[in-house]
Image: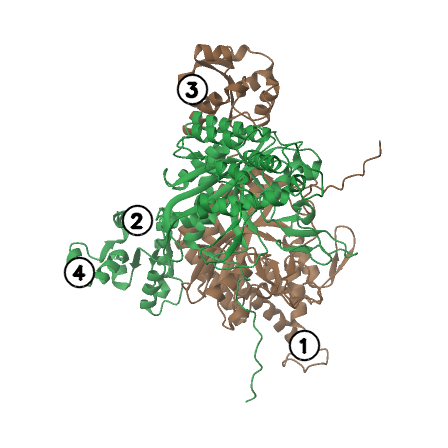
Chain colours: A brown, B green
């Protein structure tokens, strides 16, 4: 016989960086999204669902290259006759679509516009272990309000949301800060530079003096911000070294510093270490750290207003604190920033204890809508990382993981399928999750194996004897599993794992047994 | 002054064929999906959520062309060094991903595998009015069971689902048919052709006789199927004409017929008109229509088994009927097919009454998994068009459209924001949807306009007088709107639209008023 040519079959594989979610995983996420939506709704936010696909132009930041748009998004060009179609892309977050939606529908939307959105976003990044290219976000934003009351409200809502999904008070903290305070501190540093280099004012451009330092403000400010962000890793001493001459890291490598003098570094250190026992103390320390900076003073005022509003709403420092070390990215935010951290301990990859870390963050941003309309529209919002929050609840054992399968009605006699169908319909009509075995019924052992694989609590059996007697056999699979585990029937001798019931008592008896099992 | 160069701003537009969903629209769909998931779960189906993105190879059917994959899907090529990355695409339905998932995870999944999936799918088609390129599907499939009990179960579940989401019994019907019966009828037609042309058997290939007709079976069978599909538009007489010489349509144009003789057309007509008062009658008629065809007899047997199983489960002809005119596409299905139709009348674009039509359909298909594994895996499933079902419920006024906005706490005195925050927190903690006005509070009229735009039921006002008196003003906006409508206060003189309450009674009084309003 001639050798058959090998058939080319498609690979049954998700694309790299994508995955499937089964059963309880899907249900748990759905439940969590529903709970979060409930809190957001109670706060007056309205649902918005935009499409997964946006024009690259509207998404912004990622623009068509010669051939393909920049990395970071999944993008493609629409086909048209002139090969000149729009570039489309999958959304990479829920904020860029919000800006487009608000600009497009602003005449029909109330202002301020409070909206929430939940759904997958896509990133065209190199996937890694635990890093996926599609994941869920769950955002709430207030567009069109410049009031810090909007920021405070979102922090309060974030705290309420964490408690609603099952994170207990004490296991989380919402930390707030304000970018204007940071800007004030950087002004204070600049002032130090000027004072030290040219006490009578800045020198002129290009002579390498203080004015040049100010000219390169963006560069050294970014360096200072990056250094601040290392505070929780290297502490105050480490930050001071990194702001000045540099330091040796754990591996022995030398990390260059920003090059500030001790006096210049001082305002940054004062700022970073300004967290006190209560917000009043922290605010006093911050006022000292920002020196004469007007923008800094404004930032501290805003933090104070937020603290007052939150206190009035009953949100004390057990839930929301002012924490000057919160930075959250570089360019984006313009005022208040906030971050929710889960504080309970987990073990890292090397078995060392560390706190679970951030599950949500946000802040005030003011120029997203401006891209479209030219008008500056103040906005503030928060994004919850749903998958991380689910992972946290999983670790705390706080997910109601009801993975109980359906009651399985077995098939003893293929010709009496209609009888089994009647049994299963009765159960379903009574609200009981149930199914009839639909595989090949020949091997009864396979039916019980199937019930086991489905994690079924009960199997129902009806052969010829039972039909004649008007009865059913009920197999308590949960009890059966317990007996199998301990290999003795002794403990459960008063409760048989299989028993006969009248056919007419089906629903009542199964309901009673399910209740018993769940206790 | 020099003329400013015009700034190029991005257009704030959804891509063509995509749209945004706001507030109640999102909530209604979420509620419906939850209800459907509840029924599917009760039937023993497990949730599955696969990613929006699949490899084009796994999706099948759409293969990479020279440059771009065929039309119909949104696809792009992964970047890699050799410009040889995988082609990826957005899923165009939920069945193709199921086939991939089952093939990929088959060793870990129970067999039969009952799964449900809900979510958006994408079609790269020309958008039109009411035709979108992203829409929701909601599927349930049983993979790995060849039993018609699996098909019957899905039909029962479909009926239960429609009732669960609010379609009353009598307003829908699930029609079932079987492709094997159709195949049997086509065999009967072929037999007629042979009998008429060559009573002693088919002639040889290529002489234009009966054998050639059989050789071109696919073509004329497709024509016959297409003609059958017009039964509800043109009736039995019209179908007979179209099967034979053709007919004039309403516009006067002549439509060519398939070219059968009267004797050849007869089995098709007998089949199409075989629906009787009950399924027993229909089955008898069908047996007559299929002649001696073995596959036809198998199809009728399967329909009979399904009818028996459904009757045993309590699903009578008021919910599920055998209807030989159900065709559902050409190639795909191999056995039972089914379709849920909403039977209540709506007006078409021209104001003529017609029934709402199909909202769900499905059937048995057997070769989707085979593409991956080479093994034939029987499967059957249903897909509900969620958006169409929502539209139907909308028309019937059966959507619980609670578009009531939040209680709005107005801002009379910007410096007492903390007091307003305390009011709103109390309300929220009591489970009442509430918000403080976050826009510019200067113009009080704007605050009431905002409350109106939000469809708020109640506005709360607290100025200096109320603070001094320890009270709040409560404005009943629903009553206010009624009074404004009738332009007289007479009817409501015992129920003022604005009144004062003690601050301490806030939650109780607002709760009471909301209850009163909803009655």
Residue B462 appears at what percent x and percent y? 29, 60
* Whether residue A180 is visible: yes
Which of label 4 and label 3 is nearer to you? 3
Q: CA distance from mark 2 to mark 4?
A: 27 Å
User: Mark 1 falls on what kind of element?
Assistant: helix
Q: Which mark is residue B507?
A: 2
Image mark 3: chain: A
Q: Residues within 10 Å of mark 3 (few under 14, many from 20)?
A: some
Q: Earlier in the sequence, mark 2 or mark 4?
A: 4
Image mark 4: chain: B
- Left or right for A217, reference A250: left
* Whether residue A404 is visible: no
Which of label 3 and label 1 is nearer to you? 3
Which of label 1 and label 4 is nearer to you? 4
- Left or right for A177, reference A512: right
Which of label 1 and label 2 is nearer to you? 2
User: Mark 4 falls on what kind of element?
Assistant: loop
Q: CA distance from mark 4 to mark 3?
A: 61 Å
Residue, disc 1: A210
Residue, disc 3: A506
Q: CA distance from mark 3 to mark 1?
A: 88 Å
Residue B72 appears at what percent x and percent y? 61, 54
Residue, disc 4: B489
Task: Give the camera-side residue of A137 and B397.
Answer: B397
B329 in relation to A277, above or below: above
Disc count in the image?
A: 4
User: Mark 3 falls on what kind of element?
Assistant: helix
């Amino acid at each position: 016989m001639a050798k058959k040519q090998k058939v080319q079959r498609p690979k049954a594989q998700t694309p790299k960086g994508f995955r499937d979610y089964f059963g309880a995983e899907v249900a748990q996420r759905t439940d969590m999204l529903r709970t979060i939506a409930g809190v957001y709704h109670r706060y007056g936010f309205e649902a918005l669902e935009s499409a997964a696909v946006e024009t690259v132009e509207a998404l912004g930041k990622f623009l068509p290259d010669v051939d393909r748009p920049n990395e970071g998004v999944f993008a493609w060009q629409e086909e048209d006759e002139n090969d000149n179609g729009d570039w489309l892309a999958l959304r990479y977050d829920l904020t860029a679509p919000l800006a487009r939606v608000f600009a497009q529908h602003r005449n029909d939307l109330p202002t301020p516009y409070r909206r929430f959105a939940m759904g997958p976003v896509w990133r065209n990044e190199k996937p890694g272990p635990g890093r996926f290219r599609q994941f869920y976000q769950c955002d709430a934003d207030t567009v069109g309000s410049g009031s810090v009351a909007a920021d405070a409200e979102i922090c309060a809502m974030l705290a309420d949301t964490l408690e609603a999904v099952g994170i207990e008070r004490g296991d989380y903290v919402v930390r707030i800060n304000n970018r204007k305070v940071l800007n004030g501190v950087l002004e204070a540093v600049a002032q130090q530079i000027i004072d030290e280099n040219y006490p009578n004012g800045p020198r002129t451009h290009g002579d390498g003096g203080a004015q040049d330092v100010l000219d390169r403000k963006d560069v050294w400010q970014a360096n200072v911000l990056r250094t601040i962000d290392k505070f929780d890793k290297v502490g105050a001493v480490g930050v001071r070294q990194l702001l000045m001459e540099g330091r040796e890291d754990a591996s022995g490598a030398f990390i260059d510093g920003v090059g500030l003098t001790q006096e210049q570094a001082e305002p940054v250190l004062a700022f970073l270490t300004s967290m006190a026992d209560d917000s009043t103390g922290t605010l006093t320390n911050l006022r000292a750290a920002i020196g004469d900076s007007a923008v800094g003073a404004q930032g501290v005022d805003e933090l104070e207003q937020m603290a007052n509003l939150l206190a009035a709403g009953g949100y004390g420092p057990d839930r929301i604190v002012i924490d000057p070390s919160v930075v959250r990215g570089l360019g984006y935010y313009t005022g208040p920033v906030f971050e929710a951290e889960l504080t309970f301990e987990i073990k890292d990859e090397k078995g060392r204890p560390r706190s679970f870390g951030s599950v949500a963050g946000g802040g005030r941003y003011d120029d997203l809508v401006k891209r479209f309309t030219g008008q500056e529209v103040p906005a503030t919002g928060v994004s919850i990382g749903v998958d991380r929050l689910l992972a946290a609840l999983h670790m705390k054992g706080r997910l109601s993981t009801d993975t109980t399968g359906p009651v399985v009605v077995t098939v003893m006699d293929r010709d009496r399928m209609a009888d089994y169908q009647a049994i299963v319909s009765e159960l379903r009509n009574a609200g009981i999750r149930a199914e009839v075995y639909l595989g090949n019924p020949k091997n009864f052992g396979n039916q019980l194996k199937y019930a086991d694989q489905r994690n079924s609590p009960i199997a129902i059996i009806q052969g010829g004897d039972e039909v004649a007697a008007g009865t059913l056999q009920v197999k308590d699979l949960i009890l059966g599993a317990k007996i199998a585990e301990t290999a003795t029937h002794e403990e459960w001798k008063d409760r048989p794992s299989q028993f006969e019931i009248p056919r007419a008592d089906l629903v009542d008896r199964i309901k009673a047994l399910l209740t018993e099992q769940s206790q």
